[in-house]
Amino acid sequence: MRLAPSIALLLAVLALGAARPAAAQAEVEFVWVSAPLSEALYELAEATGLELVFALRLVEDVRVSGRYRASDDPDRALRYLLRGTGVRAERIREGQYVLIKEPLNLRPDIETTREAYTGTLDGRVVDAETNVPLMGAHVWLVDIGLGDVVTYDGAFAVPDLPTGRYVVRVSHVGYRPVRLELDVFPDSPRLPPTIRLQAEVIETPDTPVVAGPDPPGPTPGMTELTPRETTQQAAAIPYALGEADLAATLSWLPGLTRTGGASGALVVRGADPAQTLTIRDGVPLYEPWHAFGLFSAFQPEALSRVRFHRGSLPAPLGGGLAAVLDVETTSALAGDTLRTLGLGAVAARAVADVPLGDRVGVHLGLRRSVLGSLLAPGLRAEGGAWVLDPTGGRPFQRGGADPSVAFGDATVKLSAAVAPTAHIDLSATLGTDRVRVDLPGQRGRLDYGWRTHTASARYQGLQGQTTLLTALAYRTGHTSSEDRAFQRGLAQTEQVLVEHGVTLDIDRFVSLAHQVRAGVQVAHREVTGTLADGMREEAGQQRVAEAALYLMDTWRPGEGWQLQPGLRAEARVDDGRVLGLDLSPRLFARWSPDADRLVVRGGVSRQTQAVQRVRDRTEGRYALAASRWLLTDRQVPLARAWQLGAGAEWAPSDPLAFSLDLYGRRSTGLLEPILGADREAGVDPADLLATHPPHDGRGAGVELAARLNRGEWTLGFSGALSRTEVRPETGGAWRASTYDRPVTLGLLAQRNRGPWTAALRLDVESGLPRENGGRDVPQVRASGALGAHATLLGLRWTALAQATARPSTPSASAGVGDAGLPLAADPRGLPGWPILSLSARW
């Protein structure tokens, strides 16, 4: 049977190669006498298992004679069969040949290598009007079924083709496909052709598209966590420990610790937690913790995206000297109705994403603590302060000092699609914390409260086809109140931080490999405070306006390369006086010779922080519960830092991945307390600056992480060697910073089997420094968790039991102390006995 002459080329790939018994093979024999070459090739391929690729027109009207036995060498038999036919077999790889026409005019002094008979079909595909390379275009050799996908610069190449002319089809979504003939020559000196595609309108049913401003490719120095985590970063392991809390997962990253070891606010590379800025839906959140860092202010089901930038920051981000935690709340416009109810020993909570039609939806979140019985707070007099551990008391036992800790938060986000490619979000959050302590012997009462709130309106939509506009207006704030009732009288302190701001971002998508972002941010901040204790009255106020302009270019100049230069310019106004212009250049680079296996990254940036939070410590050990805000003005300096970092992600195989990072940081303008201070700070900015003078800071370290996935098991390693030091700007010796831990190591083993999940984690950390130059003893902690999933009554149930081996230092109520001692916090995490929690999802 012969195919129609209009089919110029046919792919004939014949690969049977099935193993046969030796006796059967000995009986195989083919004899061809003036047989069509095509039929002989089919039979030879079937008998030998060779893969033969040839054009039908090349062998038509060609007849051969010969014989093949099973004992013959297949390669030799093929060459013998083609002898005298004018057709040559070129070996591509073991057992695979391409048949080409024998050249007629080869010089005898030239070695007849494969390159003399084959060539590469190459070229470029661009937009006919703009000449922009069309990455992702499809180049298809019609008759032989081979092709290539166009790279970032519009280039394509199909190598090892027999010389000749080929029919090629070039297509791209949104463009009119073309069909043309291209020639392949051996070692062709000609320039590759440029194929220009015309744009074509494609009519389809309306589909809502929610645009996003994210640049192409991952950002260097950024770790991203999502509910469907697929990152190849070795350090990013979402693990089971922690009762519905983001901090438990983030603390696994190398270089990240917590102020209390197993609990407390996040410490990034030894820097004070106040040097990490938290952003929720584009709005700064100045207190992202509950119960002195026992838990974060986020429920995991309420988050659609978590991006953690440590070290160098991209130009649009400002205000975090050490890191920025950027989280995005889920949107009900995603189309899924999600509802979750949870109850544990720490809190009761609820989350819901509910569509209110095709174009409107609402997200609701609510959480309220249930601390007080099973997990009772503990209070002790130590180090010149009343030290409170939110979960350190004896269960079901009350008496003596009777502390209570309560917290809660609420979130609402209304989303509406105002156009197929645009939407608006109206959001509000509220978080509260309350601590009440009745001192033993009726010596007095401590009543502390904190409140964090945000409100925002955000628009995001495409303007044309290549420009994305994002506009945000917001209000955010934090209020602290401290009432201390003693026999000698009542002392009251209150401080309020309020910030109003607007942000405008314009993203221009020049091409699939090039994006430019420009933006402006304007904010007005005010801090007011009052203090009255019967002996003194004090008031303080700061008002500062800030404007920032930034420009960032994300560009892929070559295959595997990504560059991200940026510049951020900031100016502040205090009482009508401009404080000067501050320029922060930033540069990131990323190189990936193999995106699936190796990524090398590096960056350098200058960043600033205009809102600082100061907090004293008792004898250098425990942070006081009271803290104060200070804004950069004519007296308070601007905190600045240069960050330099480099690292690599390497996955030698699919289940195994490694991560290595080196970093250095140099800071100025850090407000550190004077050693030995043990009284709660006032509210006057001048007094606060006198007791917290500016310091220089420096830090450097190396971080390593490894991850191995083997069937049901996930094994992880996380470790860091680092030093972080500070000294007064006026001079003096360098000393370890408050949260400097030179050595941190972590081991993790997690198993998922059916509905069950089990995890074990071991942490070893250096002790924190003391004022006398010594250190606490190293901390060794073991944690475990066991979880199970089940479907019952139409609900998806999750049960979790977890336990943490706490430090052995006493944490229960002890000592009488003095009534006038300040309140300090020592959050150590969950106790060593199992804590249960239950959640239902539908």
Image (cartoon, helix red, strand yellow):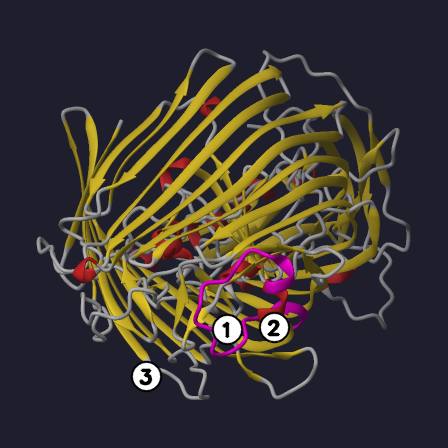
Which of these two is toward me, 186 or 778?
A: 778
* Along the viewing direction, whichever of 600 and 742 lies nearer the viewer: 742
Residue type for callout 3: Val
Tag 2, which secondary structure?
strand
The mark that comes first in sequence, 2 or 1, is 2
Residue 744 is left or right of residue 371, and the answer is: right
Q: Where's the C terminus, which quadrant?
A: top left
Residue 703 image label: 1
Position of residue 802 in the picture relative to residue 62 (left or right): left
Of residue 652 and residue 246, the one placed in the foreground of this image is: 246
Residue where numbered disc 2 is placed: 663
Discs 2, 1 touching: Cβ within 8 Å: yes
Q: Are marks 2 and 3 in contact (CB under 8 Å)?
A: no
**Which residue lies at the image location 11% right of the left edge and 57% below the top edge?**
399
Residue for point 18% across, 65% down: 813
Query: Mark 3: which secondary structure?
Result: loop
Could you tell me residue 236's position as x and y percent?
Answer: 44, 57
Of callouts 2 and 3, which one flags the residue occurring earlier in the amino acid sequence? 2
Residue mark closest to the camera, 1 vs 3: 3
- Marker disc for residue 777: 3
Q: Split into 4 quadrants, where in the image is the N terminus?
A: top right
Name the quadrant containing residue 6. top right
Looking at the rendered structure, the secondary structure element under dot 1 is strand
